[in-house]
């Protein structure tokens, strides 16, 4: 395994500055964690899994989609990548929040199913707004990452409409769009980690603008 040695350089009389050792790109890890957890939840939303099995998502949401993405976001801070740090940390927080809601949310007595759907709709609307402006920022990254954010914005928007409209059909459509989002994110992760490992362009991700 190759090792990296810190390099020191003069920084004025009597002082030196040690350049930080480079770290691996955390992007493929964050994308993989996002893709897998989104895939499982979208299988439920699309009706491929019984809605009563939604708790199967919670483990992935806590440990992979949540914790691993949050770690990827912290490593992106270390690399100086503001976009990656904001995206992975935030969506890690989303999955941790999803786990918390699934594990602890207990509506007060007398709260109707419609009220619950509308509350979830507000939660999803907030994430739609965040994802939409991150989609604008992603236009300066690769085409693959831009595609992930376009698909994710549509996914959140459709799921939001489904909750506000109390429409199982629209929510199911959101699940199918979510599956597409997961596939695109998996591809982006696959392409970056493969290109990095092979040390050449094996799979295209599109140019940075």
Image (cartoon, helix red, strand yellow):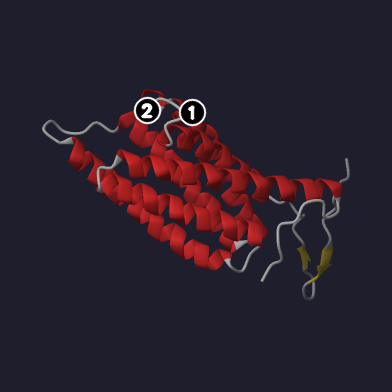
Mark yes or no: residue 42 visible.
yes
The spot of residue 161 in percent (x, y) is 31, 51
Instruction: Tell me which residue sits at (37%, 27%) in the image.
Output: 51
Q: Quadrant of the C terminus?
A: bottom right
* Residue with the mark numbered 1: 59
Instruction: Please determine whether, in this image, residue 54 is positioned above or below residue 143.
Output: above
Give whichever of 73, 109 is nearer the camera.
109
Q: Quadrant of the N terminus?
A: top right
Front residue (pair 14, 41): 41
* Residue 156 percent location from the top left of the image: 41, 51
Instruction: List x then y, in percent, for residue 197.
Output: 82, 46
**Of 2 and 168, the residue lying toward us:** 168
- Of circles 2 and 1, the one toward us is 2
Residue at 39 percent of width and 39 percent of height: 172
Q: Residues within 10 Å of mark 1 (few under 14, many from 20)?
A: few
The image shows residue 146 at horizontal and vertical percentages of 59, 60
Q: Residue furthest toward the bottom? A: 12
Q: Is residue 32 above or below residue 158?
A: above
Give the class, few, some or many, for how many residues have Cα within 10 Å of label 2's Cα (few <14, many ≥20): few
Residue positioned most to the left: 110
Res. 105 image quadrant: top left
Would you say 88 lies left or right of 7 here? left
| Element on which disc 2 rests | helix
- Displayed quadrant of residue 115: top left
Callout 1 secondary element: helix
Task: Look at mark 2 in the image and give the residue it sits on.
Answer: 51
Sequence-first tag of 2 and 1: 2
């Amino acid at each position: 395994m190759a090792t990296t040695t810190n390099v020191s350089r003069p920084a004025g009389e009597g002082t030196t500055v040690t350049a930080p050792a480079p770290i691996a790109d955390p992007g493929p890890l964050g994308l993989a964690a996002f893709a897998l957890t989104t895939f499982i939840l979208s299988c439920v939303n699309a009706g491929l899994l019984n809605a009563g099995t939604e708790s199967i998502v919670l483990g992935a949401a806590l440990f992979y989609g949540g914790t691993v993405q949050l770690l990827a976001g912290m490593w992106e801070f270390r690399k100086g990548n503001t976009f990656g740090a904001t995206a992975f940390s935030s969506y890690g927080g989303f999955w941790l929040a999803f786990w918390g809601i699934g594990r602890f949310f207990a509506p007060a007595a007398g709260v109707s199913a419609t009220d619950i759907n509308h509350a979830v709709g507000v939660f999803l609307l907030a994430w739609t707004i965040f994802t939409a402006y991150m989609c604008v920022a992603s236009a300066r990254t690769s085409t693959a990452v831009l595609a992930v954010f376009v698909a994710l914005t549509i996914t959140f928007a459709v799921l939001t409409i489904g909750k506000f409209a109390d429409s199982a059909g629209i929510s199911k459509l959101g699940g199918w769009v979510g599956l597409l989002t997961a596939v695109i994110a998996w591809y982006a992760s696959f392409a970056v980690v493969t290109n990095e490992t092979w040390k050449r362009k094996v799979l295209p991700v599109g140019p940075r603008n």
